[in-house]
Amino acid sequence: MAQPRTKVALIIPAYNEAAVIARVISHLRDTFADSPYEAHIIVVDDGSADATATEAEKAGARVIRHIINTGSGGATATGLSYAQTHGFTVAATLDADGQHEAGDVLNGVKILLGSDTDLLIGSRIIQGENMSLTKKIGNKGLGFITLVLFGINVTDSQSGLRVFSARALAELKWKTSGYEFCSEMLWRARQLELHIGEFPIKAIYTEYSKAKGQNNWNGFNIVKVLLRQRIVELFSE
C-alpha cells in the first residue's frame, strides 16, 4: 500500500501582481508535479487593486483575499495560518514577482524535511551572482541590524523564500505586518528555540521585479519599527 504523500503548502503573498502571478503559479505546478509531495498553491491577495486574485484562480491556485492591504507580514501570516489549520506538514513562502526559481523552492522543501531545521531561509547572498550591489548593501545592512538587535546572524534576513516545519507553523507568530516582519520572525524563532538554517538560492531580477519589494530608503523605516518593538519588549520583561 502506497504511503500518503507529504502535504506541502506553497504560499505566495501577492499585491497587484496580475501581470506575472499566473506564470509563477504555472512554474510551481510544473516543478512539483513529479515530486514526492502533495503540493497546494495558496495565493494571499493582499487587497490588490488589479486582477491578481482572478489570474491566480484561473491558474489553479487557492486564493485567500484580504479586503485591505495589510503588508507582507500580514499576508504571510494569513497563508501560514491557513497551512497550519489545514494540516500541512510543511509550508514554503515565495515572492509573487517571479524572483524565485521554482526549483529552489522544491530544493528547500527537500532540505528541511531531511534535517531538524524548523525555519529554512533561501539566501540570495551566499552565491549572489545576480544581486545588484545596491541590494546587497541594503540586505547586509538589515542583516547587521538583525544581529545587533536580536543576536541572530543570517546572510539574507529579508529573503521571501522560506520553508517552515510543522512546529514552526504551529508556534511561530509575529506582531509586525510590514517588511520588518522578516527580522522579527527570526527573533521570534530564536525565542522559541527553533532551528534556523539557510541554503543558497538564485535571484531572478527583471525590470518588473526590480520595481517591486523593498528599497534601501524603506530600510530606515524598518529599523525604526524594529528598534521600537525591541525597546518596548525590553522594558516589559
Image (spheres, helix red, strand yellow):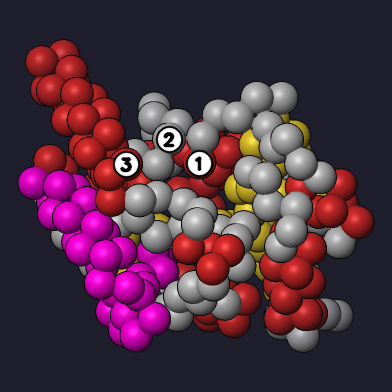
Quarter holding the C terminus is top left
Precedes in sequence: disc 3 or disc 1: 1
* Image marks 3 and 1: residues in contact by CB distance under 8 Å: no
Residue 232 figure quarter: top left
- How far apart marks 3 and 2 lie (CA) works out to 11 Å
Residue ID for mark 1: 72
Q: Name the foreground residue: 44 vs 52.
A: 52
Q: Is residue 125 magenta?
A: yes
Callout 1 amino acid? Ser
Say which of 216 and 67 sits in front. 216
Does residue 108 appear anywhere in the picture? Answer: no
Left or right: 132 in relation to 148: right
| Residue 109 horizontal/vertical position (percent) | 54, 72
State which region is magenta.
120-148
Label at residue 218 = 3
Q: Earlier in the sequence, mark 3 or mark 2?
A: 2
Can residue 80 be found in the magenta stretch?
A: no
| Circle number at residue 178 | 2
Going by the numbered disc 2, the residue's amino acid type is Gly
On the question of residue 216 being in view, the answer is yes
Rendered image quadrant of residue 222:
top left
Q: Disc 1, disc 2: CB below 8 Å?
A: yes
Q: Give the image location of residue 12, x and y in percent.
A: 63, 54
- SS of the residue at dot 1? helix
Q: Earlier in the sequence, mark 1 or mark 2?
A: 1
- At a point 86% along the width and 61% down the height, the residue shown is 59
Q: Position of residue 82 (x, y in %)?
A: 67, 40
